[in-house]
Structure formats: structure tokens, C-alpha cells
């Protein structure tokens, strides 16, 4: 066979697939995203893990440091942010692990569609099933920690934007450690320094709001960090996954 | 046409086997043979671009696969050691995902495809509840709807019963007759017509023989 042979002659179709036609990136993206959501809801235990952690720490906190209203309401903004960050970190380890173990990560890498777009479905699903429930749980936890009333809306808003960054940044760490059996600790070490700015601006937004200052600046920076992560993280994840799979 | 020139895989700076040349034409079935640890799986993974520590050239239709990755991937079907079938999903959901990320329109008849691999009526059962062989059959069902000409199959017969193996062999034959390429590893004797073997242990005069 010569090199010039038209690819059409090689584009075989079996009987069953006669009607099948090639479809674009959007179709691939939708299919991949739907699969992530279905899987998330089939593993309800994993879904509840970070939330239960979140709830448990907040229940134990007053028991440990006393139920004095002044102390707790002072600590609440920072505490809720730190716990939300740790809860996200807890849920990251498994982000690519099961796909790596059963070979579906290889298949994802071999898709003709851009890998960065496909991994974005996993990150987005992760945010939807861990970040959003954390945000929705916040009012309850704020109540338990005497969070001042002015703090509720800024807390939810800053967490809404911030957990997006946490999922995006964390997925880079999860991708880098995908080939390691015990990657949990290294994952935390890789991701922690990158989480610090998000934590600082997130917690400060709530603190400032409680003291009656404007928080537009903090929210703008949180938003900028989230957009920056949204643009860069999928490509970093794609690169890291290629290296991880290649090394196995 | 897949062309390898002075091709070898490298692990820890050591080549896994002696560099060799070969040309795999449309219609060929090539078995990669050799003992455990000879580098069969690594060779297959390198051909797919999943393992990039290799030396030499690997061209698909005259272009290096490193340079035309997207075009190459849309013509490739890789069935790996782990078939990529998600246990918590049903057979139907798994196949729709395979079709979706590959760019095959998922309007194909999932039940008909599953019937072809002997899983009629299993479409909506989670793969968790299936046996090892059935689990792999779900992965192999891709061979019936994926239009890619180049099939790279790593141990496709593992855990498949004798009847299933016979059916799979005839599928490989018909794929080759239609101008496709099959590259596979297996430790079972093949009862196929006209396949050739690259045995990574027997190197003679610039190439591997069976």
C-alpha cells in the first residue's frame, strides 16, 4: 500500500455502526460530563465524606474551645474557610485515581478531542458535588459558630468563587500524584502553598464584611484567581496526566 | 500503514529490545510475542503514544505519530490491559462514553452491539455485577462500533471463553479483510489465517521472526 492511499478507504465501519457519524467536541464533552455526574451520584459515600468532615469539625469546635459567643464569632469566618479548604483537599485524592486504575484514563488520553477540555468535565463535576454542597451547608455552620449576620452572604459568595479555585488548583495536584500508590500526603504538600492566597482573600472578605467594610476588592481578586486557574489548570492537568500514565 | 524504523522502547535508559524495522500494511494481523517482561505491552503503549520513552521512528500513513497526534488518535482503537470499563456504570453508559469521547455518534444500537459479544440483555446492569469475562466483553464491544482502522489489542482473549475467542478471531479476520490493521499480544495459540508474528525474543538479521 502506498503512503498516498486515501484515508477514506481505511475508515471502516462495521455493520452496526453504519449510521454513526463523527461528531464534535461538544458531544464528547457532554457525554464525559454526564458520566462524571452519574458516577458521583452512584458513589454517595464519597459524595458525603467531605460534608460529614465539614459538619463534624464544626460540631466539635465549640466543644473544644468553649461556647463563648464572642470567641466563636471572632473565629468563625477563618474557621469555616479553613475547614472548607481541608474538606476539598480530602476529596481530591480520588479525582483521577479510579480512572487510572481501571484504564479509562488511558482511553481518555487516546480521545482525538483535546484532553484539557475533557478533564475540565471532571473538575467541574468535582466542584458541583463538593464545592456547591459546602456552600449550601455554610449557613447552618455559621449558625453553630455564631457567625455575625453580616457575614453570611459574603461567606457564601466567597466560598462559591473560592471553592472553584480550590477544585481547579487541587486537580493539578491530583493529576501529578495519580501514578503514586500513596499520593495523599504529597498531594497536600503540592497543593497547600497554592491554596494559601485563596484562603487569605476568602477569609479576609468575610472578616471585613463582619466589620462593616466593603469587600469588592477581595471578591474581585478571588474571581481573578478563579479565572486564572480556569484558564491554566486544565492544560496543566492534561500535561500531568500524560506524564503520570506514561510512567506507569 | 504503520511503519517502524529502528524502533525500541527505553526503560531506565536501557532499551527493552533490539531496535527493529517493520512495516505493517492495511490488511495485516500482527501478533507481538515474547515471554513476560519482554516489552510487549510497553511496545503497544508506545505505538499508541501512551508511553513516550522510545527511540526510532513510528509513522502512521507517512507522518510521525508525534506530529499528527489528533489525526492518528481518531484512527486508533486501543484495548488495554485494563479495559477502561467503569464498574459503577452500566454496560450502556460505558459504551456511550466510549463512543462519545471517540467522536462516534452514540445513536448506534447498544443492545445489538452487546448481543454480538454475547451480552444480550445486560445493557442496563452495572458492570460491578458482571463476571471478569463479561466485564472484558463490555470493553471488547467497542470493536463492533468503533470505525477506527488501526486496532491495538493487549491480551484481548484474557478471561474470554472458547466460544468468545472464536468469535473474536473471526471479527479480527474480517477487520483485516476490510483493510484494517490488527496488532495484538496473546499467549494463546491463534487459529487465524495469514497472520504474522513478531517475537521479541528471536532477533535475526535486522528484524524479529516468529
Image (cartoon, helix red, strand yellow):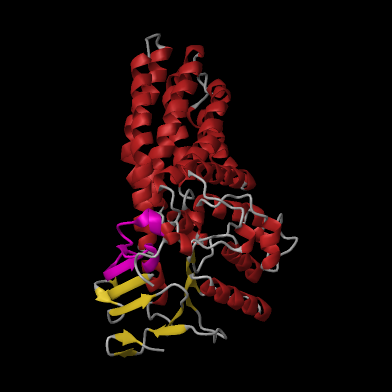
Residue nearest the observer in this picture, A1 or A235? A1
Q: Write the residue at 53% across / 43% down.
A: A27
For the C terminus of chain B, the quadrant is: bottom left
User: At which x and y percent is residue B156?
Assistant: 54, 73
Q: Write the residue at 49% across / 70% down.
A: B179
For the view shown, which residue lies furthest in the top direction? A212
Magenta-highlighted residues: B47-72
Q: Residue B2 appears in which quarter of the rendering?
A: bottom left
Q: Is residue A132 above or below residue A94?
A: above
Q: Residue B125 appears in which quarter of the rendering?
A: bottom right
Magenta segment: does it hold B49? yes
Magenta segment: does it hold B141? no
Q: Is residue B161 above or below residue A22?
A: below
User: At which x and y percent is residue A212?
Assistant: 40, 8
For the N terminus of chain B, the quadrant is: bottom left
Is B163 situated left or right of A53 in this image?
Answer: right
Q: Write the residue at 54% across / 52% down.
A: B104
Amino acid at each position: 500500500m502506498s503512503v498516498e492511499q486515501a484515508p477514506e478507504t481505511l475508515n471502516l465501519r462495521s455493520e452496526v455502526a453504519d449510521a454513526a457519524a463523527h461528531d464534535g467536541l461538544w458531544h464528547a464533552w457532554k457525554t464525559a460530563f454526564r458520566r462524571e455526574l452519574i458516577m458521583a451520584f452512584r458513589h454517595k459515600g464519597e459524595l458525603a465524606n467531605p460534608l460529614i468532615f465539614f459538619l463534624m469539625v464544626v460540631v466539635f469546635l465549640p466543644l473544644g474551645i468553649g461556647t463563648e459567643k464572642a470567641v466563636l464569632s471572632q473565629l468563625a469566618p477563618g474557621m469555616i474557610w479553613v475547614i472548607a479548604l481541608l474538606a476539598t483537599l480530602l476529596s481530591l485524592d480520588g479525582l483521577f485515581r479510579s480512572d487510572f486504575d481501571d484504564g479509562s484514563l488511558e482511553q481518555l488520553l487516546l480521545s482525538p478531542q483535546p484532553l484539557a477540555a475533557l478533564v475540565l468535565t471532571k473538575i467541574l463535576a468535582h466542584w458541583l458535588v463538593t464545592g456547591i454542597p459546602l456552600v449550601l451547608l455554610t449557613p447552618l455552620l455559621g449558625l453553630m459558630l455564631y457567625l455575625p449576620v453580616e457575614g453570611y452572604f459574603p461567606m457564601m459568595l466567597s466560598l462559591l468563587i473560592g471553592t472553584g479555585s480550590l477544585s481547579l488548583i487541587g486537580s493539578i495536584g491530583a493529576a501529578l500524584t495519580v501514578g503514586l500508590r500513596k499520593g495523599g500526603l504529597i498531594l497536600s504538600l503540592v497543593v497547600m502553598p497554592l491554596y494559601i492566597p485563596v484562603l487569605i482573600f476568602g477569609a479576609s472578605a468575610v472578616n471585613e464584611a463582619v466589620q462593616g467594610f466593603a469587600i469588592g476588592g477581595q471578591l474581585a481578586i478571588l474571581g481573578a484567581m478563579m479565572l486564572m486557574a480556569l484558564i491554566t489548570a486544565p492544560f496543566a492537568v492534561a500535561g500531568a496526566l500524560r506524564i503520570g500514565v506514561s510512567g506507569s | 500503514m504503520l511503519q517502524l524504523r529502528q524502533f525500541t522502547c527505553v526503560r531506565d535508559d536501557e532499551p527493552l529490545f533490539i531496535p527493529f524495522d517493520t512495516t505493517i500494511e492495511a490488511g495485516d494481523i500482527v501478533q507481538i510475542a515474547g515471554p513476560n517482561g519482554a516489552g510487549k505491552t510497553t511496545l503497544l503503549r508506545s505505538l499508541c503514544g501512551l508511553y513516550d520513552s522510545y527511540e526510532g521512528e513510528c509513522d502512521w500513513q507517512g507522518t510521525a505519530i508525534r506530529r499528527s497526534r489528533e489525526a492518528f488518535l481518531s484512527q486508533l482503537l486501543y484495548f488495554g490491559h485494563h479495559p477502561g470499563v467503569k464498574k459503577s456504570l452500566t454496560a450502556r453508559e460505558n459504551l456511550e462514553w466510549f463512543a462519545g469521547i471517540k467522536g462516534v455518534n452514540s445513536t448506534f444500537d447498544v443492545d445489538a452491539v452487546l448481543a454480538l459479544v454475547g451480552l444480550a440483555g445486560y445493557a442496563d446492569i452495572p458492570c460491578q455485577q458482571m463476571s471478569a469475562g463479561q466485564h472484558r466483553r463490555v470493553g471488547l464491544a467497542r470493536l463492533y462500533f468503533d470505525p477506527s482502522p488501526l486496532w491495538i489489542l493487549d491480551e484481548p482473549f484474557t478471561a474470554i471463553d472458547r466460544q468468545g475467542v472464536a468469535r473474536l478471531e473471526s471479527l479480527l479476520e474480517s477487520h483485516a479483510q476490510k483493510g484494517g490493521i490488527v496488532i495484538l499480544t496473546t499467549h494463546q495459540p491463534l487459529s487465524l489465517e495469514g497472520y504474522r508474528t513478531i517475537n521479541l525474543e528471536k532477533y535475526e538479521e535486522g528484524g524479529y521472526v516468529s
